Amino acid sequence: MNTFNKLLSIIVPCYNEEESVPLFYAETIKQEAFFHEKGVEFEFVFVNDGSRDKTVEQVKKLHEKDERVHLVSFSRNFGKEAAIVAGFEKARGDIVVLMDADLQDPPALLPEMYQNIESGYDSVATRRVDRKGEPPIRSWFARRFYGLMRRISKTDIVDGARDYRMMTRQVVDAILSMREYNRFSKGIFGWVGFDTKWLEYENIQRAAGETKWSFWKLFLYSLDGIMAFSTVPLSIASFLGILFCVVAFAFLIFIFVRALAFGDNVAGWPSTICVITLLGGLQLLCLGIMGQYLSKLYLEVKDRPKYLVKEEF
Ligand code: UDP
Ligand code: MG
């Protein structure tokens, strides 16, 4: 009879993962022996993010065999970020690890992650060193995004970082203390700080099912990330304003001197139209940026729940 003195919660956000869930469980449970030796017990927290397939049934089947399997099932699809929060809130573990259901986060890494926690790290993060098997255009945009983030945000957001992370209770509580509605986990993990160990591995293809992220969804998600962790876009308006004041002033002097020297002439209609449309466009752009932040603010102020639970055990 083993006596366990620690609990490891494995949080798994699932959206239409009926094929992956049993595979995931089977693969992950293989690591159990290592943890039992260390006196660590497992707990699974599957978060069903409004799947339209049989994901819930699959989790229930696992629960019948294994009581340590838990479920939080949403009333609809709230997105992976909401699923992560729900998982963190449900998890009771002294140590918590966040994993994708599709086995792109290799369970074989769990022992090494745990050893790092044991040796004193608060959090163990992973990043993939390549993006093999991904459409090149997606990789290109992803790299641009991380490059931009590094420049305009003070928070450390690492290129290729996965959400695959193991952390202590202290870090989990820190993350849960961030109550924001518009969540961007990669930024949140960096923002809370603590001693983080990075492990690297090569990209792994999905075990079953297909990716839930279209290019467009990822693009919008990256905008969320920028707005949640940087206010630089807001200063674009002020910067352009100053720039154009200087240009306008120089232009004014030029016209004034020219009028004095050569007299007034009416030509210059095309240039006038160009200036007007350019300025009009810039003003709308700046207004749009402001509108984006305002819309985020609007959602924060409404303080709606991040997710609604239909069923849990
Ligand atoms: N996921 C989710 N809600 C969503 C989209 C995705 O819970 O709205 C989960 C999904 O089931 C998977 C993880 O988030 O466990 C990562 O998704 P996916 O593998 O599709 O992303 P990719 O690895 O292609 O970036
Ligand atoms: Mg995946």
Image (spheres, helix red, strand yellow):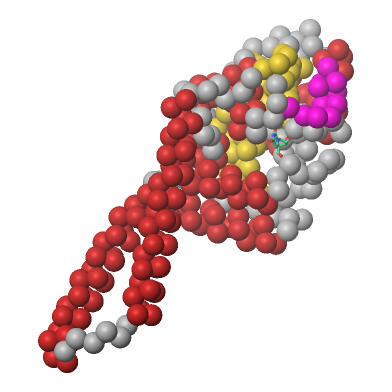
Tell me: residue 249, above or below residue 266: above
Image coords of residue 305 (percent x, y): 55, 21
Toward the front, the furthest residue is 266
Q: Quadrant of the C terminus?
A: top right
285 left or right, relative to 99: left
For the point 43% across and 27% down, the residue is 301
Q: Give the magenta range.
A: 49-60
For the point 83% across and 17% down, the residue is 60
Image coords of residue 151 (percent x, y): 43, 55
For the point 49% across and 31% down, the residue is 299
Question: Can residue 62 be seen?
Answer: no
| Residue 41 vs residue 252, the one in the foreground | 252
Question: Can residue 151 be seen?
Answer: yes
Residue 291: image quadrant is top left
Residue 258 painted magenta: no
| Residue 34 vs residue 72, the one in the foreground | 72
Tell me: residue 220, above or below residue 189: below
Residue 144: image quadrant is bottom right
Toward the bottom, the furthest residue is 262
For the point 67% across and 21% down, the residue is 9
Q: For the image shown, how many numbered marks are present on the structure?
A: 0
Q: Quadrant of the N terminus?
A: top right
51 left or right, relative to 164: right
114 left or right, relative to 134: left
Tell me: residue 96, above or below residue 20: above
Image coords of residue 298 (percent x, y): 45, 32
| Residue 270 vs residue 112, the one in the foreground | 270
Image coords of residue 68 (percent x, y): 76, 14
